[in-house]
Image: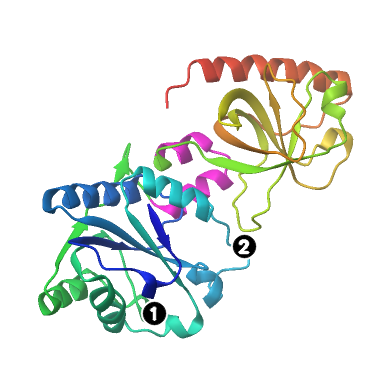
Amino acid sequence: MKIYHDINSFVPVKNAIVTIGTFDGVHLGHQAIFRKMAEDAREINGSTVVITFFPHPRLVLNIDSSNLKFITTQEKKFQIMEKSGIDHVIVIPFTKEFSRTTSEVFIKSYIVDIIKPARIVIGYDHHFGKNRMGDFKLLYELSLKYNFKVERIAAQDIENIAISSTKIRKALEGGDVKKANLLLGYEYTLCGTVIHGNELGRSLGFPTANLAIEDKFKLIGNCGVFACFVTYNGIKYKGMSNIGYRPTVGRDALTTEVHIFDFDKMIYDEEICISFVERLRNEMKFESLDALRQQLLRDKEHALTTLENYTP
């Protein structure tokens, strides 16, 4: 997959199948669009092209941006897009000046003139252009004018829950990792560098890797103890993770840490990824460190059972 950070560097491809969006989470609804694009590309011997934006428009326009967090990092988005059959990704720098581009000008100047699409595929509720005034009706009218086809993918739902990035964020903020994963189609993941902690876990027989997450806009799920998988150097391990403030030892800073089962390597300053499977319990304050250790033993047993019975 080729990634372009300047649309003018894109060389038109034969029979381009195009979609447009921010795609936070790259959830099952987004993946349905990408699958349709890949099918169309095979049908007409074409190539798939995603148009996306950075920074996120809401950050630039200050729309509810003070608490805005994202489900996926840009890197993770690209990984899922490539896995879903996308050939080209064009990242348009989103600025206040660009935000004033009307829907018609955007389609004509950015899509038609530069990419020359054979088809544009969009989700059922997609809007684009200045003030998000562009919709499927306008896109259909422009398709007749500029000679491309347009397709709209119906709303996707799982167990009668309509899939959206907003619903996934709310599920994670509420601690419902299972629901979030169901809508994402993969495990919600946090990646970061392992840093030194106070080594309390080691004294309890449960050494933990403390995670430093560099992306300040990355959504960190609600506090609690979770069954999880941990990926290190391309190998996946079972583990249990804690997101919280460690009230038993009087900490007041939010931390993300993970105990990796059957693992004894020193991995400070190295990157790991935690893929959350299920929330086991709330974060709790214990009367003593021994009470905490006894609970951790129960948590480990619960986590192992959960992970052994887990089907992605």
Membership of 168 in magenta stretch: yes
Instruction: State the image coordinates of residue 272 (x, y, percent, origin top left).
Output: 64, 37
Disc 1 on helix, strand or loop?
helix
Q: Residue at x 41, y 45 (%)?
A: 80
The residue indicated by pointer 1 is: 131
Query: What quarter of the picture does the C terminus occupy?
Result: top left
Q: Residue at x 27, y 52 (%)?
A: 33
Badge 1 crowding class, 10 Å Cα cut-off, few under 14, some 14 to 19, many 20 or more, is few
Give the vertical position of 205 relative to 39 (above or below). Answer: above
- Contact check, label 2 and label 1, Cβ < 8 Å: no
Q: Residue at x 68, y 20 (%)?
A: 299
Q: Disc 2 or 1, which lies upstream in sequence?
A: 2
Identity, as a three-letter code, of the amino acid under mark 1: Asn
Classify residue 147 as left or right of residue 253: left
Residue 25 visible somewhere in the drawing:
no
Membership of 30 in magenta stretch: no
The residue indicated by pointer 2 is: 67
Q: Which residues are magenta?
A: 164-182
Classify residue 229 as left or right of residue 142: right
Instruction: State the image coordinates of residue 209 (x, y, percent, origin top left).
Output: 74, 33
Secondary structure mostly seen in the magenta stretch:
helix
Q: Tell me the colour scheme of the image.
A: rainbow
Instruction: State the image coordinates of residue 122 (x, y, percent, origin top left).
Output: 26, 61
